[in-house]
Image: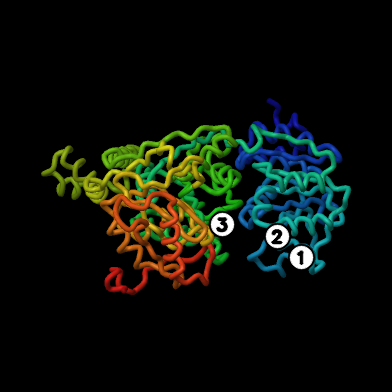
Amino acid sequence: MKTFEELGVASPILKAIQEMGYELPMPVQEEVIPFLLGEDNDVIALAQTGTGKTAAFGLPILQKIEVSVYQPQALILCPTRELCLQIAGDLNDYSKYINGLKVLPVYGGSSIESQIKTLKRGVHVVVATPGRLLDLLTRKTVNLSLVKNVILDEADEMLNMGFSDSINAILAEVPSSRNMLLFSATMPQGIANITRKYMNNPREIVIGRKNEGNENIKHIYYMIRAQDKYLALKRIADYYPNIYGIIFCRTRKETQEIADKLIQDGYNADSLHGELSQAQRDYVMQKFRLRNLQLLVATDVAARGLDVDDLTHIINYGLPDDVESYTHRSGRTGRAGKTGISISICHIKEKGKMREIERIINKKFEKGEMPGGKAICEKQIVNLIDQIEKVKVDEEEIASLMPSIFRKLEWLDKEDIIKRMVSLEFNRMIDYYKDADEIEVVDEHPGKDRNTAFGKKESRRSRDKEEGFIRYFINFGKSDGLYPNQLIDLVNKCVPGKVRIGKIDLLDNFSFFEVEEAAAKRVVDRMNGFEIDGRRISVEPAQGKKGEGKGDSKGEKKKAASFYDRFDKRTRNNDKPWRRTSRPSSRKNRE
C-alpha cells in the first residue's frame, strides 16, 4: 500500500491531513487520487458511503487550484444541506496550510444575500446543492466559466430527489472542456444516462462490486407480524443498551408516530422528516451528533446526505421499495473500516424484497432471534456493571461526603447494596418484561396456495377458505391502492389484539380476506366502524352460510359486486387516512 506522499499529494495538504490523523490512504483514495492529479480525466467512482470519498476527490482538486485567481475553479454538487456543509468543512481542513484558498458552501435554508456577497469577494471552490446554485445562476451572481472540475457526489441520491433537470441546467453553464468526476454508491440507469451525455471516455473505478453493500456491515432480519413491529423495535433497542443509530420509516406520518411513541416510553429519541423547519432539523441533528440522542427516527429523504460518525445500528422499520435506498440506509453504519449492524423488521410479504436485496448486495441476511425479557434484562444489567467498573472516581471531591454515606449504609452488607442498586435502576424494566408476551415469529414458509412475498398470485392458487378461517368481503381493492401489506396494516389498526390473517384475494374494486374464526366477530364489529376519508369500510361474510359458495363462484362475485355498489365511489387514491368514525360500531345500531 502506498502512502499519501507516494500518491503525489503536495506537502501543504499532506501536513494538514497528517494532523487530522490520516496515515495511509483508503482503497478509494489510493485508486482515485493519482488519476485525478492528471489532466483531462473523467472518472466514475462507485464506492459506499464512509469509504473516504471526500478526500479522494477533495485532495487532488485542492492541489490543482490557482489561488491567485479568485473565481470558482471547482464545483461540487451534492444532494443535501448537511452533506454540503460536511464536504465544505472537510475541504477547509485539508486546505488549512494553503494560504488564501476559499471554499464556499451554497445551500437553501440560509441567507442567499450572504452567499452572494461572499461570491463577489471571490472563492475558489463552490460546494452546492442544485436548487440553490440554480437560483444563483438565474440571478447571474455566480460565474462558472473558469470551472475545471465538476464533482457530482452521491449522484444517485440527487437523481432520486428529482434534481436531474437542475443538474442539466447547471452543467450547461460550465465549460465543455471541464473534467467531470462522478461519485456514487450505486449505479442506476440515471447515472448511466449522465455518463453518456456529459462524460468523455470516463474511467470507472469500482471499490467492491457495483451496488454491493459494505463488507463490514452485518445484515439481520426479524420476520414478525405487522402489529408487533413497534414492540419488536423496543426490544431491539433494549437489547442493545449502547445503541446509537437511525430508524428508517417509509412516511413522514409514521416517522413522527414512532418517534412520539419512543419518547413517551422513555427512549432517548427524536424525529427527522420533511415537515420540520430548517431550524428544527439543525437542532435535532446537533443533538444527534453530540449523542444527546441515541435514536434518530427518519425518512429516507430527510436522512439523505447525513454524515454521522460511529453509528452502531441502522434499523429498517420495514424494507424500502428499492435496493438503492437499502444500500444507502445500511451504508451509514460500518464506516471507515468499523463494523455496523443493519436490522430489518419485516413482515412475510417483504420476503421477496429481502431476497432481491441479498442478490444485489451479494450478502445474506441473518435471521435474528427476537430477544426475550430475561435476555434483555441481563444485557442491561451487565451494561450497568460495565459502566460502574469504568467510572472515574474523583477522590478529593467526594472525600468529605463518604463518612455520612458510610454511616447511612452501614447496616447493609455488600450484597444488599448491589441488589438495591440494580433494583433501583431496573425495577421498571423487570416489571415490564415479567408480564410481556413473547413476540410471535411468522412462518416464513406458507402453504403453496398462499400469496407470495410480493403479493403476487401463485399460478394454482385456490380461493377456497382454509380450515379454521372465515372468508370476508371488503369494499376496497387494487384501484384504491389496497395491496396485501396495506390490508394487513388496516386490520391491525382497526382491530385490537392479535388477529391471524389467512389468504388474501385482491380484485380491482373489492377484495376478499380470511381471518381466524376466534377473531371473526371482533374483526367485523371493529372494521365496520372505520372510514377512509369519509368513505366507510364495509366488511361482510363472503358466503351466505358456513361451508357454502366456494372460490370464484359467479354467485359470490355477483354478491360482492352488489356490496361494493352500495358504497360511495367518488374518491380513490393511495393516501387516504384511515380513521375511526364516531358512529356506533355494531351492525344493528348502524342499520
Q: Is residue 528 left or right of residue 352?
A: left
> Tag 1 or tag 3, which sits nearer the N-term?
1
| Secondary structure beneath label 1 | helix
Q: Residue 290, image x and y in percent?
A: 49, 52
Label 1 sits on what residue type?
Leu
Can you tell which of label 3 and label 1 is closer to the viewer? 3
Asked whether residue 275 is in view, the answer is yes
Q: Residue furthest top?
A: 1
Q: Is residue 460 left or right of residue 227?
A: right
Q: Residue 270, image x and y in percent?
A: 45, 58
| Secondary structure beneath label 2 | strand
Q: Which residue does the image show at 48% across and 49% down from the upper left?
A: 246
Residue identifier under label 1 = 136
Q: Is residue 287 above or below residue 370?
A: below
Distance between the alpha carbons at the discs numbered 2 and 3: 18 Å
Q: Which residue does the image show at 79% across and 38% down from the upper left?
A: 36
